[in-house]
């Protein structure tokens, strides 16, 4: 990973805990079983990359570009995704732990979150138009001034979303999840 430009490479079992990996470019790369926890990936570009079974907890992503990046079965605790570059920002998550992450003010239409733990994730000011939260635990996730038009929450659970502060025209919810939309009224639904 010492080179500055990496194209079509696979990184397997790379351990870079607490290291600086700044100003690099990764295009069409795959990362498997890597541990980059507490590292600094600021000013780096990831384009068409995939992370599988990786630990990326608490990495720093200041001014990092994430252009079509997929995460599968990854540990992503406490990442400030809101510090990433906005231009062409596109991420997808499957079977991953995203607890305590921040996506504040990101434009993320059509983002897919599949079977993820998303406890206390911040979506303040985020555009999640037509995004899908399939089988996701959104316990204490923060939705405020979040655009949820057409978003799908039918299999998501533990969410609390205030419809007065989050535009959600044509968003989809299950009948079991209705309580999460009425939480602020302190009413009991049986």
Image: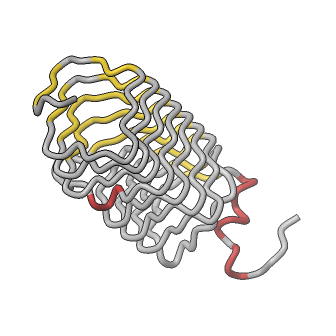
Q: Quadrant of the N terminus?
A: top left
Quadrant containing the C terminus is bottom right
Left or right of 14 on screen, residue 40: left
Residue 71 image offset from top left, x and y in percent: 42, 34
Instruction: From the viewer's perspective, tell me whether residue 37 is left or right of residue 19.
Output: right
Front one among 38 and 130:
38
Residue 100, relative to residue 69: is it above or below? below
In the image: residue 30, left or right of residue 2: right
Q: How is the image coloured?
A: secondary structure
Residue 8 is situated, as x and y percent measured from the top left of the image, at 20, 17
Q: Residue at x 68, y 52 (%)?
A: 157
> Residue 184 appears in which quarter of the rendering?
bottom right
Q: Residue furthest bottom?
A: 185
Report x, y in % for residue 32.
Answer: 41, 23
Q: Nearer the viewer, residue 185 or 66?
A: 66
Image spot of residue 63 (x, y percent): 19, 56
Q: Residue at x 37, y 63 (%)?
A: 126
| Residue at x 60% of width, y 57% of height | 119
Q: Toward the viewer: 30 or 131?
A: 30
Give 143 or 162, whichever is nearer the viewer.
143
Image point (36%, 37%), residue name:
16
Reply above or below: 5 against 127.
above
Number of numbered discs: 0
């Amino acid at each position: 990973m010492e080179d500055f430009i990496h194209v079509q490479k696979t990184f397997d079992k790379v351990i870079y805990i607490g290291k600086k990996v700044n100003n690099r470019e990764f295009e069409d790369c795959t990362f498997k079983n890597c541990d980059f926890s507490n590292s600094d990936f600021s000013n780096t570009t990831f384009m068409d990359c995939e992370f599988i079974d990786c630990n990326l907890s608490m990495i720093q992503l200041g001014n990092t570009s994430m252009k079509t990046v997929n995460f599968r079965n990854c540990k992503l605790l406490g990442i400030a995704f809101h510090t990433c570059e906005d231009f062409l920002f596109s991420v997808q998550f499957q079977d991953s732990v995203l607890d305590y992450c921040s996506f504040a003010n990101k434009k993320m239409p059509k983002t897919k979150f599949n079977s993820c733990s998303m406890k206390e994730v911040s979506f303040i000011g985020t555009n999640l138009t037509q995004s899908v939260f399939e089988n996701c635990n959104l316990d204490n996730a923060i939705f405020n001034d979040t655009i949820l038009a057409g978003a799908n929450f039918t299999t998501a659970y533990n969410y609390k979303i205030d419809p007065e502060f989050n535009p959600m025209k044509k968003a989809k919810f299950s009948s079991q999840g209705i309580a999460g939309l009425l939480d602020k009224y302190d009413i009991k639904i049986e």
